[in-house]
Image (tube, grey):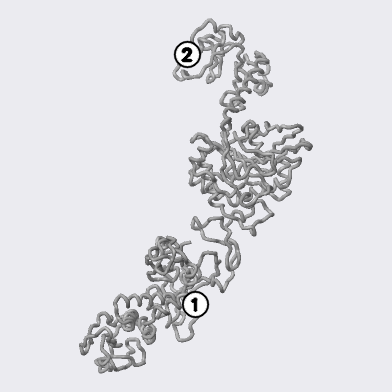
Amino acid sequence: MSAQTCPADKGLNPGLMCQESYACSGADEAVFECDECCSLQCLRCEEELHRQERLRNHERIRLKPGHVPYCDPCKGPNGHSPGVRQRAAVRCQTCKINLCLECQKRTHSGGNKRRHPVTVYHVAKVQGLLEEEELDEETRRKKMTEKVVSFLLVDENEEIQVTNEEDFIRKLDCKPDQHLKVVSIFGNTGDGKSHTLNHTFFYGREVFKTSPAQESCTVGVWAAYDPVHKVAVIDTEGLLGATVNLSQRTRLLLKVLAISDLVIYRTHADRLHNDLFKFLGDASEAYLKHFTKELKATTARCGLDVPLSTLGPAVIIFHETVHTQLLGSDHPSEVPEKLIQDRFRKLGRFPEAFSSIHYKGTRTYNPPTDFSGLRRALEQQLENNTTRSPRHPGVIFKALKALSDRFSGEIPDDQMAHSSFFPDEYFTCSSLCLSCGAGCKNSMNHGKEGVPHEAKSRCRYSHQYDNRVYTCKACYERGKEVSVVPKTSASTDSPWMGLAKYAWSGYVIECPNCGVVYRSRQYWFGNQDPVDTVVRTEIVHVWPGTDGFLKDNNNAAQRLLDGMNFMAQSVSELSLGPTKAVTSWLTDQIAPAYWRPNSQILSCNKCATSFKDNDTKHHCRACGEGFCDSCSSKTRPVPERGWGPAPVRVCDNCYEARNVQLDVTEAQADDEGGTLIARKVGEAVQSTLGAVVTAIDIPLGLVKDAARPAYWVPDHEILHCHSCRKEFSIKLSKHHCRACGQGFCDECSHDRRAVPSRGWDHPVRVCFNCNKKPEAAPCP
């Protein structure tokens, strides 16, 4: 703006003189007011001053007749009322500043300044301008809120009705980069919460629905944006109302409280009731106990400088009475806030989570209710950014979403506690230990973060669940805690070898670090209990959906069936007679290391007679070569090969050389020892296989149910594939995943891998989902 000399400008405001004295020495009449220079200026001073580069863009206004300037201290950066500009009532001639009545009283009521000469502006003009400005400001604010509408943020089932951050900002109808605070309201149903918000923020417009009916007019959580105060206003469902899902709706209130910067507790009663103090006290305790950790995690994800959970929101108790005096009126020496703290203390409630608690009362002799005091108190608290600063709307949505994801789900009626507004059952995991009945102490949905169930108390042993776990004692003494389980076989044994050893030497306990540390029948007598020698025991909780205590020998029968299935498949693929093929296959599976495999024996090692498909091949227990029956009909002890003192089959050459000791190294003897055990069991098994193998399909169908591990879903309960949902039929076979125990079709479970946690040390059938997980951990 540039100054132009105009004779008509002179004489408009003869009482207002130039306050700069830059070019006129203060003798000329003021024509302009520069808000950034904080002064009235004549034509010459205005022109000279604003030629300077740094002052050129200042905003100036031309004075009108009867102009009253603003108070200089009020409009300055250090004014006592930030954002509020008062008109001046006087001008100090000595200090050369304009002062409103409040600033004059504050700065010129004592000392030498009280003697400073002042020029009084016309009071009527000042008052008229103030009233006019107030009317203009109220009109402007009303116009800003004309198009505001509310929207459903969370329904009565705790489901967020906003899809994402962009949708939240769009429904609020605020600028994407606008930083704002959150104001929410709580109180009993029928106390006028929605009405209070409408008159406090939106000048009486029904932004939030109100109704004279008995039923609650607010169901769920509703939100709207106030563009005047730049806050998100949230209306909640009333307490003590007739409603279903009471527990979930009460929990929803605490989620809203946790994301709020300022909370209004509205009560329309002649006296403050105990439910007000119990609600705020219980909310404070639940906030600190359950929500602080989750809000800190949200803070880290959003990259905020100030944690959301440093302090909870500020609280304003808005108390409206009709027949009784307001709190503290009969005790002028005591402030209402102190009386409120005393009530909390008497009830044993401590609202430590809230940054501050304020009391604002109004007594309504005749309607309507006066909300101006509440509005001023709110504006004062919103200007205070000491504990809570305005933040991006996306951060508000993320915080609400994080709390809703963590604390969600139905609350069983038998877990409802009536001694508290927010019992622990509303926020903690509902799982109970199957053995002792103790509840999980972790928060809801902790499994999504991979956090296991935990309980405060120790568990007791239950034979039904066999919840005793073993840890390797040697590893424990070295500072490591390694869990071990009794197994039918070591991880280094093949399936048939392991089962053979299991039948002969009993179960084993194998440590990943120390190897096999125990066999239950290692000696003919005098075997010690593993608890006394190699393992430590601990009784642990059994949680629904987990099978962490199934011992490996529970799978022994099923592993045998798997082996029989494999044999049957081998027989059909080779198109051989079942008895000889199975015997040959079994022999190779459990043969000692020095035996020549059946597949390599094509003719007798002595007479060179070729073997046909149904001919029997015999191994010499001394040299390990293959012979026909006539060339290996003799027997003698072969102790040097580990067969003990009993006579066993040998070939003619080894029988004739029976007085010659075989040269067998110690390493070979150790390597053969385990396989000989398997062979001894195998020879007993072979004697019965000839009768069974021709009807191998019949026993498989009959014993399958008895052989099923405990964690497998029974066949009669499996109607569809657990993955693709195909319906099973005669043509579509059912297969069990060895990791999770669910039923699948062949296409969804054709992968193979070991599942050590279930006792399957060798590759077995698993589903797609379990195959993707490390160590084929059971899928939920």
Q: Which mark is residue 530?
A: 1
- For residue 327, what is the image quadrant? top right
Q: What element carries label 1?
A: helix
Q: Residue 378 carries which label?
A: none
Q: How crowded is mark 2: few (under 14 residues within 10 Å), some or many (20 or more)?
A: few
User: Where does the image place residue 689, in percent across and percent down from the top left?
Assistant: 37, 84
User: Where does the image place residue 684, in percent across and percent down from the top left?
Assistant: 39, 86
Which residue is situated farthest in the left direction here? 608
Q: Is mark 2 on a helix, strand or loop?
A: loop
The vertical placement of 417 against 330, above or below, is: below
The vertical placement of 768 against 346, above or below, is: below
In the rendered structure, which amino acid carries the disc numbered 2? Ser
Foreground of the two, 729 or 75: 729
The residue positioned 44% from the left and 18% from the top of the image is 53
Is residue 591 among what the camera can see?
A: no
**Eye-nearest disc, 2 or 1:** 2
Q: How crowded is mark 1: few (under 14 residues within 10 Å), some or many (20 or more)?
A: some
Answer yes or no: do the residues labelled 2 and 1 have beta carbons within 8 Å? no
The residue positioned 49% from the left and 36% from the top of the image is 176
Is residue 100 among what the camera can see?
A: yes
- For residue 743, what is the image quadrant? bottom left
User: Where does the image place residue 298, in percent across and percent down from the top left?
Assistant: 51, 47
Residue 525 appears left or right of 317: left
Q: Name the residue under label 2.
A: 2
- For residue 82, what is the image quadrant? top right
Foreground of the two, 513 or 361: 361
Return the disc, 2 or 1, that comes first in the chain's sequence: 2
Foreground of the two, 576 or 261: 576
Q: Distance between the residues labelled 2 and 1?
A: 100 Å
Residue 600 appears left or right of 55: left
In the rendered structure, which amino acid carries the disc numbered 1? Pro
User: Where does the image place residue 773, in percent across and percent down from the top left?
Assistant: 42, 61
